[in-house]
């Protein structure tokens, strides 16, 4: 191998890294402008500052991981099975998060409602029928779609090695943990004689917990020790 080709090979990763840094710097700058513009134009005031920026953690981490992950070669049957597994996973997450609900609407409640909210949280879109309610929260939906895509890739990889499949399963359970925390907190509160402190503490930090676990889940599904399919 010539010296020129060797040096070119060394420069390419650095160039790609520099390009990524510039791209994501622009993205973060635009997100900050959106937040400033929203609160400046609406006059609204954030009650908890970190909650304003958590949606961008979900959005940026999810988009970054999906953009750098490619599924392995697989048969049509394997792709269909992996797609079904990922779709079921997405539905479970949205149902557990309350984005999808059955039988909780008023019999006369039908239609679409649009509500403005802080970027990432909104715009909130709700579709309601007498037997079905769909709620679109941008960062949640994008985050769950990203996880589902990574699960799709993990299932395809799992067909070739048992360890990545097991790791993907454990990770999926971990992704759902924050959604279970609130329910556990409610049970704990009832057992403790209706202690408001326990329930309030769980509710206050549920988004913090779900954000941490979301990032960990994306990391585990992206940096799998075996069978990785990344750009």
Image: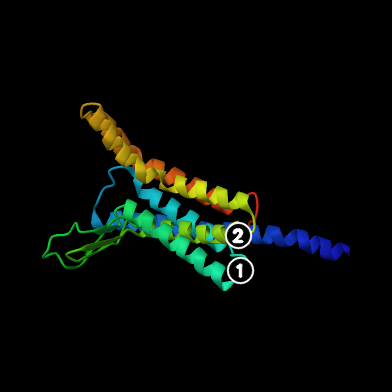
Residue at 45% across / 43% down in the picture?
212
Q: Which residue lies furthest to the bottom in this view?
A: 76
Classify mark 2: residues with Cα within 10 Å, few (<14), some (14-19) or many (20+).
some
Where residue 184 appears, as percent x and y from the top left, is 32, 37
Is 190 situated left or right of 166 in this image? left
Q: Mark 1 points at which residue?
A: 74
Residue 224 seen in the current view = no
Q: Nearer the viewer, residue 67 or 31?
A: 67
The mark nearer the N terminus, 1 or 2, is 1
Where residue 74 appears, as percent x and y from the top left, is 61, 68
Please tell me whether residue 206 is drawn above or below residue 139 in the rendered image.
above
Residue at 16% across / 68% down in the picture?
110
Classify mark 1: residues with Cα within 10 Å, few (<14), some (14-19) or many (20+).
few
Residue at 37% across / 55% down in the picture?
92
Q: Mark 2 points at which residue?
A: 159
Q: Which of 218 and 41 is in front in this view?
A: 218
Where residue 153 appears, as percent x and y from the top left, is 55, 61
Residue at 44% across / 51% down in the picture?
57
Q: What element carries label 2?
A: loop
1 and 2 marks in contact (CB < 8 Å): yes
Is 112 situated left or right of 227 in this image? left
């Amino acid at each position: 191998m010539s010296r020129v080709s060797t040096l070119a090979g060394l420069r390419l990763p650095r160039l790609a890294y520099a390009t990524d840094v510039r791209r994501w710097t622009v993205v973060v700058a635009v997100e900050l402008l959106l937040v400033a513009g929203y609160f400046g134009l609406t006059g609204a005031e954030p009650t908890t500052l970190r909650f304003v920026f958590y949606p961008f953690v979900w959005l940026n981490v999810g988009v970054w991981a999906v953009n750098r992950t490619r599924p392995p070669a697989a048969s049509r049957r394997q792709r269909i099975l992996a797609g079904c597994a990922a779709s079921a996973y997405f539905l479970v997450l949205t149902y557990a998060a309350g984005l999808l609900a059955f039988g909780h609407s008023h019999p006369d409640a039908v239609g679409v409602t649009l509500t403005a909210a802080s970027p990432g949280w909104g715009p909130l879109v709700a579709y309601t029928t007498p037997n079905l309610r769909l709620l679109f929260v941008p960062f949640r939906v994008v985050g769950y779609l990203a996880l589902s895509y990574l699960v799709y890739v993990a299932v395809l990889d799992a067909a070739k090695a048992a360890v990545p499949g097991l790791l993907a399963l454990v990770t999926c359970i971990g992704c759902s943990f924050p959604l279970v925390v609130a329910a556990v907190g409610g049970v704990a509160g009832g057992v403790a004689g209706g202690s408001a402190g326990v329930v309030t503490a769980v509710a206050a930090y549920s988004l913090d917990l779900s954000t941490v676990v979301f990032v960990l889940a994306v990391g585990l599904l992206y940096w799998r020790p075996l069978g990785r399919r990344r750009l």
